[in-house]
Amino acid sequence: MSNSLMAARDAFLSRFPEQRIEIDGRSWGLIDTGVPGGEDGDAAGPCFLFLPGTLGRADVFFHQIDAMAPHLRVIAVSYPESGGVVEWAAALPGLMERLRVGQAAVLGSSLGGYLAQYFAAERPDLVAHLFAANTLHSVDGIDQRPPYSSDLWNAPIDELRAGFAAGMNAWRAAHPDHADMVGFLLTEAEGRIPEREMRARLDAIKTGPVLPALSNTADAATVIEASDDPLIPPPMRDAVRARNRPAPAFRFLWGGHFPYLLRPDLYTNLLLARLGIVPLSAEWTKAEDGVFQA
């Protein structure tokens, strides 16, 4: 069965292939669009850094990377096979220095959102704008829930992958019109993300540190959530908004845990609008709780 998302992703990768870069002894995946116009990297130029969730490599944001590249340099990473939130956050300054990036707007989704919040708290001097998307405020108690309750480094990898497959297939049963997205993500869960990389991603959440306090301002931080996100329940969304205040929050009324795949144009518009590059879409309206929604 053909999958339009995978075909579009593969076409994107023919132009922006993932490369490898070693930072602090760990090998990261890297997509780097370079400076618009083909100029040499400039530390003073605008840059955007994407940090994926558990089920995405750097290219999972291909819609956004492609649309944003004419406006600013865009970088996205795939995680190494070891380390966790603390180690990865400690490596990001070295990555930015290697790429001659002085500051970046940083978006993390899910696992990446936890990492982005930690990094922004530890190194606010390097984060021009924090986007905390479909993410957590705390990992307290997560080690009591599957799959995190397992021995993530020794449990059969097929069992860990099967958990993702069950969740995605349940979403497809409830939303048959999202079959392309489910197929796209199942290829990630079933092997496109290598075994050790998958284990490291799961362990990064299980062993995640307590998040330090943020120094957000309303103009330099944004919370993104979705009303129908099956992985981030309403109390957690409330807590993410609270710890990121005074950052405004933008709620997708539908889009699940992956609005950047299901509603890519509106998602991209939101990112560029929050950076002052384009006007915010008129689809966004303010709800009674002060959250913008569309």
Image (tube, helix red, strand yellow):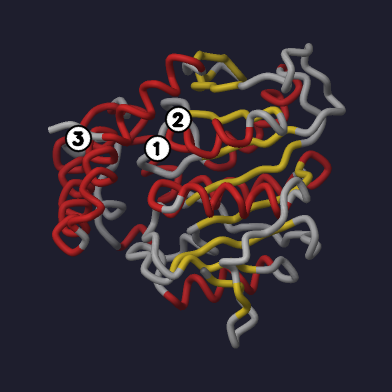
Q: Is residue 265 above or below residue 76?
A: below
What numbered label is drawn on residue 56? 1
Residue 145 percent across, percent down from the top left: 29, 61
Residue sitting nearer the eye, 36 or 22: 36
Residue that badge 3 annotates: 157
Residue that badge 2 annotates: 59
Q: Is residue 31 above or below residue 135?
A: above
Q: Nearer the viewer, mark 2 or mark 3?
A: 2
Residue positioned 72% across, 57% down in the render: 221
Instruction: Describe the element under mark 3 as helix, strand or loop.
Output: helix
Q: Is residue 178 above or below residue 25?
A: below
Residue sitting nearer the eye, 290 or 138: 290
What numbered label is drawn on residue 220? none
Instruction: Describe the element under mark 2 as helix, strand or loop.
Output: helix
Contact between marks 3 and 1 (CB within 8 A): the answer is: no
Residue positioned 56% across, 66% down in the render: 283
Left or right, 273 with respect to 240, comes to: right
Contact between marks 1 and 2 (CB within 8 A): the answer is: yes
